[in-house]
Image (spheres, coloured by chain):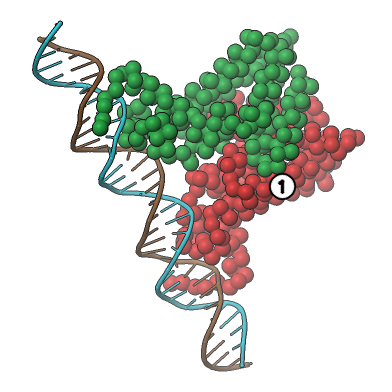
Chain colours: A green, B red, C brown, D cyan
Amino acid sequence: VTVRKSRLEAAKTRERILGAAAAKFREHGIAATGLADLMSAAGLTHGGFYRHFDSKDQLVAETCATTMTELVHQISANASVKRGPQGLRAVVSAYLSAEHRDNAGGGCPLAALGGELARADEKTRAAATEGCLKLIEALAEHYEGLSNEEARKRAGVVLSTMVGALILSRVVADPTLSDAILQDAERAIARAT
Amino acid sequence: VTVRKSRLEAAKTRERILGAAAAKFREHGIAATGLADLMSAAGLTHGGFYRHFDSKDQLVAETCATTMTELVHQISANASVKRGPQGLRAVVSAYLSAEHRDNAGGGCPLAALGGELARADEKTRAAATEGCLKLIEALAEHYEGLSNEEARKRAGVVLSTMVGALILSRVVADPTLSDAILQDAERAIARAT
DNA sequence: TGTACATCAGTGAACGCGCGTTCACTGATGTAC
DNA sequence: TGTACATCAGTGAACGCGCGTTCACTGATGTAC
């Protein structure tokens, strides 16, 4: 019982696979996510995967690119609504929220997959690198009255603190400590802004 | 050609397996490291593993505990040599060095395995949690003239920034950006100390 | 101290299983005339 | 516009492979007398 889908539907299928990968990779890790899991999450059987992607590595690279771009867009969008310190605080507050911590599948790929991305292939790391650069630029837009260079430096440190705090808050099993890590990081960034 | 080893030698073998695991897990990730790899790195065949550990999960938990303890000791040892802001700067400088970035196998387990530890079993996360608490305390010892609570808050933020910066510096494929992330984080922490 | 026996560290083959990937096949979609 | 044919999205079985784990076996170590 097989039916060839139209090109439009096939393109949607590809997007569904990418979406499932984006969620599963960030939830369970790249190595721990099998293609069969992924495809059934997308409502397909595993054999069809290779009509859309050359390999798991290619899917990883594309997923890294799209999730990083999504994150950049979230931050850029916020930057056009609230400018300056208030805008930065809003971004940081959302990033360091309990909701983000508890929703790794829809959150920051750097925090969810940092270690695995560091060991990933060239294309994946290139996508991650470009995403990092854009993230830093998007954060830097909130610093007014500073040179571009200085703004980017501060933005980089803010990104480091955010990623580190989110990871630690997920590693730690004690909910009180986990909350404290997020709040203390958020306040420290707000104070320095 | 098999030879039963004395209990002393068996204990050394156990340590060798733990040491190999500590290095391989941090280099390649937990999921990506097979027991056969591990055992041959320890100079044994894979079948002997279960004379020393109940399961891979148990090995992971023990490895997490020992590597976290090692990290805490490094920082505590430093704290007893150089106290105060200078001591903290020395710790941060070593942590955020290019050497540490390029030697994941001998470095911080939180940075190398953060994402995987967050998804690990209860015992592993308990070891990681205790390690985090002790790390924060060890860092907090360097803050003079502050309440314990305030010192621990600042130490937690410093830890978040260090872990985040090290991870980002490893993810990023551009060496210039990677170096900048480390240096900017180090300087920001030094400035706030 | 010497002897007989139980223990158990380590070997290497084997277990079932899920992995990424390939393939023959189906039949609606898309194309050429 | 209608017909004939090629394309190709998706299925489901199969591939070799490495995984974590188990097991029968070996023989030096450790123990009991």
Q: Quarter of the image holding residue A149?
A: top right
Q: Position of residue A62 (x, y in %)?
A: 45, 26
Mark yes or no: residue A17 visible. Answer: yes
At x 52%, y 20%, the residue is A69
Q: Is residue B6 above or below residue A114?
A: below
Q: Is residue B99 above or below residue B57?
A: above
Q: Quarter of the image holding residue B55?
A: bottom right
Q: Position of residue B90 (x, y in %)?
A: 76, 38
Q: Position of residue A56 (x, y in %)?
A: 40, 34
Assign a secondary structure to mark 1: helix
Residue topped by disc 1 = B130
The answer to whether A14 appears left or right of B112 in the picture is left
Mark yes or no: residue B94 visible. Answer: no
Alpha-carbon neighbours of circle 1 within 10 Å: few (<14), some, or many (≥20)? some
Q: Position of residue A55 (x, y in %)?
A: 37, 33
At x 76%, y 21%, the residue is A190
Q: Residue furthest right?
A: B145
At x 70%, y 42%, the residue is A174
Quadrant location of the N terminus of chain B in the rendered image: bottom left
Observer-nearest of C24 and C3: C24
Residue type at mark 1: give it: Glu
Quadrant location of the C terminus of chain B in the rendered image: top right
Observer-nearest of B68 and A12: A12
At x 62%, y 46%, the residue is B106
Mark 1 belongs to which subunit? B
| Count of residue discs | 1
Observer-nearest of C28 and B58: C28
